[in-house]
Amino acid sequence: MKKKEYKPLGLYIHIPFCKSKCVYCDFYSLPNSEEKMDRYTAALCRQLSEISRQTTAHQVDTVYFGGGTPSWLGEKRLRQILKTVEKHYRLAKKPEITLEANPDSAGNWKTLRALRRAGFNRLSLGVQSADDAQLQTLNRPHTFAQAEEAVAAARRAKIKNVSLDLIYGLPGQTLESWRDTVEKAAALSPEHLSCYGLKVEEGTPLWDMQSAMDLPDDDLQADMYLWTVSRLEELGYRQYEISNFARPGCESRHNLKYWTLGEYAGFGPGAHSDLGDVRYAYVRDLDAYCLGVEGQGDILSENDRIPSRERDIEYLMLGLRITRGISRQEFEYKFRLPFGPVQEVLERFEQTGRAVMRGGRWRLTPEGFLLSNQIIGQCLEALAGEKLRREEATANHDYRVR
């Protein structure tokens, strides 16, 4: 008898609590709200149980606790939430279960050991910089020494998969100080590194402060990025996405779902889901979310049905973010559209060293990643032009167009 096959599913669990708000943070997070933690945990567990009924055809192979600062929620509540997942969902044999944490709340190895024993097997630490003055400017609640202590605690707790987040383009940052941050982070031997360029988002304190900040210009940020790609490759970290680098086999399986159009279900205020051809999101309001789960209101802020055949734009946008790239054969099979106009764009950028075709797949080079918005935009324009041409041909009953 043939063994039943289940579709892979990732769970994202948003923990919006944090010790303090960073000046650049655009995520939905709440400092100084510890009194709401118990109610929120109960609401999460209740909704996890309810949504599980829609996933009987799935097998959960990744669970990601993001924030905010999930570690700020506390060991007991985190174990309660994960236990609810284990009770109500079909888990894969070796699921990737990630916990985001700030170094100041992840320095107790006994707590990390308890979480590891509960099932957490990947720790993502928001280090951001090795320069304490830069951390203070960002209103980060920790020092780099605490980051070193957190990694040591994770290793003592026998957590074998540690990721560090770093940010380049910080106020007052030079190429030399960024190099120092990367070298010191790499010296901690993490399995994964995420290196993000600083984005100044409207509505954040940094947006209002930017004119008084000494922010690196685009050319300097480009130098930082290209040096990082080269240096991390030398150290054995393979780039697999614009901002992400990993030792072989240690890529973030959960985040790859977003970039490869995999299915995922999100929980918590502001969380997004893509499940069963429906993309939906919850309100960015903890109290409204809890009331909705408790049956006293609507919690959806978005709800759109997008059939798989209509995901051609997403395939290009997301596929060109990862080093695996995109395939003509894959594209034409999935979407029944010609790849030729997109390939023409990529061939032009190939001539300038910003795109390359290997093994039947087109991908952007590191220099191309720096212009990814421009390149992707031109690919989408070419695709839109082809769609319009086909629509006009259909309207004119010209069936020679394929």
Image: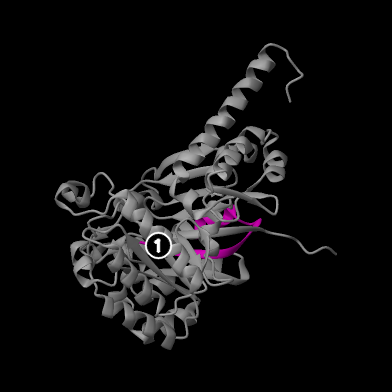
Q: Nearer the viewer, residue 133 or 140?
A: 133
| Residue positioned 63% across, 16% down in the render | 392
Q: Which residues are magenta?
A: 49-67
Is the residue 296 above or below the residue 58 in the image? Answer: above
In the foreground, 120 or 246: 246
Q: Is residue 388 above or below residue 53?
A: above
Figure quadrant of the C terminus: top right
Whether residue 384 appears in magenta in the rendering, the answer is: no
Whether residue 120 is visible to the viewer of this picture, yes or no, is no
- Which residue is denoted by mark 1 in the rendering? 195
**What's under tag 1, amino acid-wise?**
Cys
Q: Is residue 247 above or below residue 281?
A: below
Element type at marker 1?
Answer: strand
Q: Position of residue 245 (x, y in %)?
A: 49, 65
Point out the image quarter for the N terminus. bottom right
Residue 278, image x and y in percent? 55, 42
